[in-house]
């Protein structure tokens, strides 16, 4: 699993829009801290709470120079609808093949819900050099991160 002090694995994927735009994390590193917020699934209550909480604090993160990116195994179409429905103004990244989720060591299954290969809820802050300076992985996917701690990590990056 990726943790503080590691070089953040870069990856390519698709932005969560109906336009299927290409995304490359390497293009975002070096322009200020990057917050990668992995979440299990769009439109679920805990994931909605987390993404809306990040949106509510987006100005604070932007003032600190950070870029927020949500990452899930949802399709770009689902992510686009999720962003539109909740007024999210930061990018979501679709990892439908699960390669990035596995590379970060976050793959989990929720058999009771018929979900397999989803991302566990986790947050990583990556500094301008591409080093992970903060990591948090939920011990229960319904838990939310400490948003103040994430912002502190961004401000210290």
Image (spheres, grey):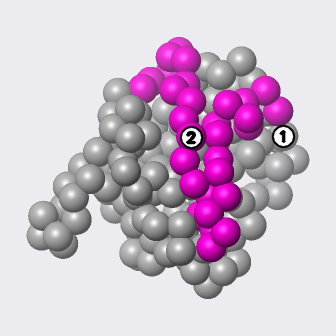
- Which secondary structure class fits the magenta region best? loop
Q: Quadrant of the N terminus?
A: top left
Task: Say if 35 sits above or below 116 in the image.
Answer: above
**Disc nearer the start of the sequence (2/1):** 2
Q: Quadrant of residue 20?
A: bottom right
In the visual, does 45 lie left or right of 62?
A: left
Percent position of residue 132, x then y: 57, 24
In the rendered structure, which segment of residues is drawn in magenta?
2-31
Q: Which residue is mark 1?
A: 65
Residue 61 at what x, y percent from top left? 77, 48
Residue 49, compared with residue 139, is above or below; it is: below
- Does residue 15 appear in the picture of this structure? yes
Secondary structure category for the residue under label 2: strand
- Foreground of the two, 36 or 78: 78
49 is higher (above) or lower (below) than 140: below
Q: Residue at x 70, y 78 (%)?
A: 87
Magenta stretch encompasses residue 10 = yes
Q: Image check: 10 left or right of 156? A: left
Q: Is residue 156 visible?
A: no
**Which residue lies under the disc numbered 2?**
12
Give the quadrant of the C terminus: top right
Residue 111 circle label: none
- In the image, is residue 69 part of the stretch drawn in magenta? no
Q: Residue at x 82, y 58 (%)?
A: 59
Residue 12: which quarter of the image? top right
Q: Residue furthest left?
A: 112
Report the front residue among 38 and 19.
19
Q: CA distance from mark 2 to mark 1?
A: 22 Å
Q: Secondary structure at mark 1?
A: loop
The picture places residue 86, in percent across and down from the top left corner, at 63, 79
């Amino acid at each position: 699993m990726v943790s503080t002090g590691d070089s953040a694995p870069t990856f390519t994927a698709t932005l969560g829009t109906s336009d299927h735009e290409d995304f490359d994390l390497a293009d975002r590193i070096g322009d200020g801290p990057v917050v990668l917020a992995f979440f299990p699934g769009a439109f679920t209550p805990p994931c909605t709470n987390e993404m809306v909480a990040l949106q509510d604090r987006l100005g604070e993160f932007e003032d600190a120079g950070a870029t927020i990116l949500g990452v899930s195994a949802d399709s770009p179409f689902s992510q686009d609808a999720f962003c539109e429905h909740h007024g999210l103004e930061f990018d979501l990244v679709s990892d439908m093949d699960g390669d990035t989720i596995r590379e970060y060591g976050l793959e989990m299954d929720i058999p009771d819900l018929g979900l397999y290969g989803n991302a566990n809820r986790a947050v990583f802050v990556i500094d301008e050099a591409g080093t992970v300076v903060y990591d948090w992985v939920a011990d229960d996917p319904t838990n939310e991160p400490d948003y103040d701690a994430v912002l502190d990590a961004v401000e210290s990056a």
